[in-house]
Image (tube, rainbow, N blue to C red):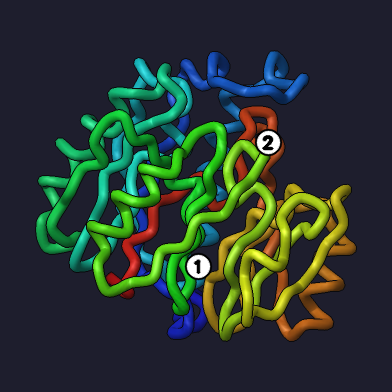
Amino acid sequence: MEASVGMDRLFDLVFVRPPPESYVKCVSTNPSRSKIDPMLAKEQHRQYVSKLKEYGVSVIELPPLENFPDSVFMQDPALLGSQRSIIGRFGEVTRRGEEKALFDELRNHPTKIGAIRFVREPSTLEGGDILVTDRGLFVGESRRSNSSGAEQLAVYLDGIEVRPVKTSLLHLLCGCSYLSKGRMIIAPDLVNQASFPGFEFVPISVEDAYAADALYLGDGKVLIPSGFPRVTKKLDRAGYEGIEVEMSEFKKGDGGVTCLCSPVYRLF
């Protein structure tokens, strides 16, 4: 039985892509990367998709891309909106080409997404650096996304405030995620709360920072990686319910909960 639809989330549709057999060759700094179990990764991805559907999210599953080991991390190639969509440009050179494959596939869904624009070189912009809130967008200037990428995004999304945030993380969303009603979950040791004036925070420790990459499902439900009881308690005290999903094989690939899908936002 499907849970109630989360009307206060910012999207109702996501695109996903299952991990390819080549996922074991993904770009990752995690020392356990060599221990990735591709079959377990596929099962965890199925469970992830099942959780999204359970909480009322529509899911379009694209085929795996064997030539791109990191392609399961669907958040990164683009920022999708119901009226305007932006195909990014990877800072990670080995992933370039994923965005073209996505563009070719998105043309099969013209009623689902808005008009598509492209980030042009020398700019770089990856979706993992884009924090979408109902009070504007924040773009991490990181190893993967540069300031001119953020500037191009601001031009494309005229009328929506786009603010840059310096970060030393792989992606900005490795240390924070938007929940609802002006509230964020954040690892303040990794991301400066002062970068988000006017927001309230659910702060978590640096030891639990992997769970700062969380996906708000609506109606107070937050999808988080399993195994973080302190985060579950903090969310509970803030009025949220943590919905756990096993992410071990994606953590080994430097990926988190938000990385596995590309939402189609209603805001733009």
* Horizontal relation, residue 224 to residue 154: left or right: right
Q: Position of residue 112 (x, y in %)?
A: 19, 62
Say whether residue 49 is visible: no
* Horizontal relation, residue 210 to residue 222: left or right: right
Label 1 packing within 10 angstroms: few (<14), some (14-19), many (20+): some
In the structure shown, which secondary structural element does the residue marked by tag 2 occupy? helix
Q: Report the mark closest to the observer, 1 or 2.
A: 2
Tag 2: amino acid: Lys
217 vs 131, nearest the viewer: 131
The answer to whether 229 is drawn above or below residue 35 in the figure is below
Label ID, residue 224: none
The earlier-in-sequence mark between 1 and 2 is: 1
Tag 1: amino acid: Glu
Exactly how many numbered labels are in the figure? 2
- Label 1 – label 2 distance at C-alpha: 23 Å
Disc 2: which residue: 251
Label ID, residue 54: 1
